[in-house]
Structures are given as structure tokens and as C-alpha cells.
């Protein structure tokens, strides 16, 4: 695999990607980052962005920076723009916008952020504080600690359809940017360049396909976020016609549910509703949904919503 990586770099295009680097020391210890994709020729919805930022801020440590960024923050460099275009050509549908996320370290280090929690807008946070999630890198303070922390994809689609040993979900990303200093930042840049120049196709999963590839090329670059911090609802629908695997059942039955990830289009309209409900009302609402759809393809995802909302 490493031989293929270096061969791909040697055969790459003219634009050579420099590793992400701080302009001096990192000055922002912890940041919460809302990532949003703004379609071309469309203005960002500032009211929606403000609401999302304030929601995230409620759960971040006091004094933490909380910001929103989109794809326009990521491609201010010719090499970045060139590699992004190559990756988008290998992506389909939503994957064309998801691959932007692999370039996040360049934007985050320019902002002087040491550690960043990057989140999507379809999350329901079920705990008062995200400190437990933010502290995960502190258990690995050696030179070889992970640069990125992700939860494993709870769908079996990644391992069964694409023959990955393990696949990841990109809805919650914890970047340890200090761990990217020196060789590890260079290796991350090389991995992106190799993926863009090589034969790998990203399909609809975009960034998630890259992270899975990175995990195979660079073991130890990615740390595992417990399911409790990314309880994925819509991912189970990808298993329609494939069947379930033990990992999903374990995640449903044994994990806590600190963050509910409503990553399925039919359920995204429930995000705002559940965010503003107190616990008992949310449990009752989820139970009613489950009762109405017990014999449909919605039953397994709604069961996960109900299990999450009704935990003590």
C-alpha cells in the first residue's frame, strides 16, 4: 500500500499540496465548527447558520470558539483547488460536496485552532456538555496519536458493498490539529494527493470513502469515537436488502446515546422538533412514531430514535 501511495504522488499533477501548518503556534485551544455546504450562486442562510451556531455553543466549553465554515473557506490555494476538482470528478451526487471536508485541516490551522469538533447540522445533542467527546485525544498524547477521531459507520454497506475492513461516518469529526505538526501533516497531505491522483472512486460517500482509505494507508491516523457520540439513524437504511450485522445490534442495545445523528432525509425534519422538546415529550413522540411504522422500512431507524430518546 505504501509503494502505491508514493507512486501515485510521483505520477501526480503539477500542483503539489503542502501540509496544513499553523502560522505560528495554535492560539485557539478548542473550537466548535459547523460545516455547511452552500450551493454555487446561492447566498448562505444567515438566520439558519446563527441558530446552528448558538445550538452548538450551548454544549461547548465556556469561552470556546464556535464558527461556521463552508466550502469557500477551504480552496484558497491552487493545489487545494486542483486536488478537490480531481476528487469531485470521482464522486457522485452528494459525494461531490462531502469531499470538501478532507481539506478542513488547512482552513482550521489558518484560524489557529488546536482542536476542532466539526459537526453537521442534523444532530440532536442529548447531553449538556460535549467535554467527554472533546477530551478523547487526551488519552493519546504521544507523537503517534490520531489526527482525526471518527465514529465507525453503523451501516454494513461500507464493509459489504465496498469491501472495506472498516468504514467511518463523517457527521462528527474531532480534529487534533496539533498532532498534524511535522511528518504527520506531510503524510496526510500525501494521502490526499495520492487519493486524488489514483484510481480510487469516492462515489456518494465522499469524505467517508477517503477516511476509510486513509485508515488503510496510515494505521493510527484515525481514532475511534464511541457510538454514543454519533448514534446514526439513517445509516441503517443503507442496509435495506443487505441485512444487519452484529455491530449495529451492539450499538443499539449497549451504547449510550449522547448525540442522535438524523442522517436520513425522511427524518431530517425531526431535528428541530426534538431539539426543543424536553426529555419525556421527546420519548413520547419517538414512541408514537415507532408505533405507527413498525411494519415499514422506517421501523429499524425509528427504533433507534426511540431507544435514544427514551434512555434515562
Image (spheres, grey):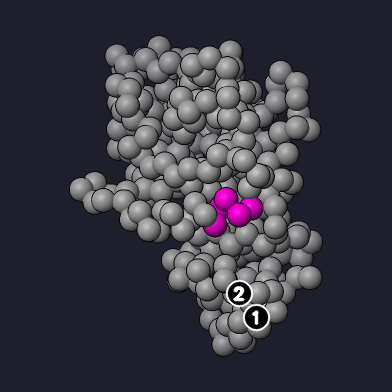
Asked whether the residues under the numbered discs 1 and 2 touch, taking CB atoms below 8 Å apart as contact, a structural biologist would say yes
Quadrant holding the C terminus: bottom right
Quadrant in which residue 243 is drawn: bottom right
- Residue 91 drawn at (x, y percent): 35, 42
- Residue 98 drawn at (x, y percent): 41, 44
For residue 123, say whether it is visible: yes
Q: Which residue is painted at 33% across and 55% down in the image?
A: 45
**Label 2 secondary element:** loop
Image: magenta residue range = 55-59
Q: Which residue is painted at 62% across and 41% down in the image?
A: 63
Q: CA distance from mark 1 to mark 2?
A: 6 Å
Q: Which residue is painted at 66% across and 29% down in the image?
A: 146
Q: Which residue is painted at 57% across and 22% down in the image?
A: 26
| In front of the other: 182 or 222 | 182
**Where is 176 relative to 70, above or below?**
above
In-image side of 222 versus 102 (left or right): right
**Label 1 secondary element:** helix
Query: Does the magenta run of residues contain 56?
Result: yes
In-image side of 1 versus 95 (left or right): right
Give the tally of numbered discs: 2
In-image side of 17 versus 213 (left or right): left
Residue at the spot of label 2: 277
Query: Does the magenta run of residues contain 151?
Result: no
- Residue 281 drawn at (x, y percent): 65, 80
Quadrant holding the N terminus: top right
For residue 238, say whether it is visible: no
- Residue 96 drawn at (x, y percent): 34, 44
Residue at the spot of label 1: 281
Quadrant in which residue 35 is drawn: top left
Amino acid at each position: 500500500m505504501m509503494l502505491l501511495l508514493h507512486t501515485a504522488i510521483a505520477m501526480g499533477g503539477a500542483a503539489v499540496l503542502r501540509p496544513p501548518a499553523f502560522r505560528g503556534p495554535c492560539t485557539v485551544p478548542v473550537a466548535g465548527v459547523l460545516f455547511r455546504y452552500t450551493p454555487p450562486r446561492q447566498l448562505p442562510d444567515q438566520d439558519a447558520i446563527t441558530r446552528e451556531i448558538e445550538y452548538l455553543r450551548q454544549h461547548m466549553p465556556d469561552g470556546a470558539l464556535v464558527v461556521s465554515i463552508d466550502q469557500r473557506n477551504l480552496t484558497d490555494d491552487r493545489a487545494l483547488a486542483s486536488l478537490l476538482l480531481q476528487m469531485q470528478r470521482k464522486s457522485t451526487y452528494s459525494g461531490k460536496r462531502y469531499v470538501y471536508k478532507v481539506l478542513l485541516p488547512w482552513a482550521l490551522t489558518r484560524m489557529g485552532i488546536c482542536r476542532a469538533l466539526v459537526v453537521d447540522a442534523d444532530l440532536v445533542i442529548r447531553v449538556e456538555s460535549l467535554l467527554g467527546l472533546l477530551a478523547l485525544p487526551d488519552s493519546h498524547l504521544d507523537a503517534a496519536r490520531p489526527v482525526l477521531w471518527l465514529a465507525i459507520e453503523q451501516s454494513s454497506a461500507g464493509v459489504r458493498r465496498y469491501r472495506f475492513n472498516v468504514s467511518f461516518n463523517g457527521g462528527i469529526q474531532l480534529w487534533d490539529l496539533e498532532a498534524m505538526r511535522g511528518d504527520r501533516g506531510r503524510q496526510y497531505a500525501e494521502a490526499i494527493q495520492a487519493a486524488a491522483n489514483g484510481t480510487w472512486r469516492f462515489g456518494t460517500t465522499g469524505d467517508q470513502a477517503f477516511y476509510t482509505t486513509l485508515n488503510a494507508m496510515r494505521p493510527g491516523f484515525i481514532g475511534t469515537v464511541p457510538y454514543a457520540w454519533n448514534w446514526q439513524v439513517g445509516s441503517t437504511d443503507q442496509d435495506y436488502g443487505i441485512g444487519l450485522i452484529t455491530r449495529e445490534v451492539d450499538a443499539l442495545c449497549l451504547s449510550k446515546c449522547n448525540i442522535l445523528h438524523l442522517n436520513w432525509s425522511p427524518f431530517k425534519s425531526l431535528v428541530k422538533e426534538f431539539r426543543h422538546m424536553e426529555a419525556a415529550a421527546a420519548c413520547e413522540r419517538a414512541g408514537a412514531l415507532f408505533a405507527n411504522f413498525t411494519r415499514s422500512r422506517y421501523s429499524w431507524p425509528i427504533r433507534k430514535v426511540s431507544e435514544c430518546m427514551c434512555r434515562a
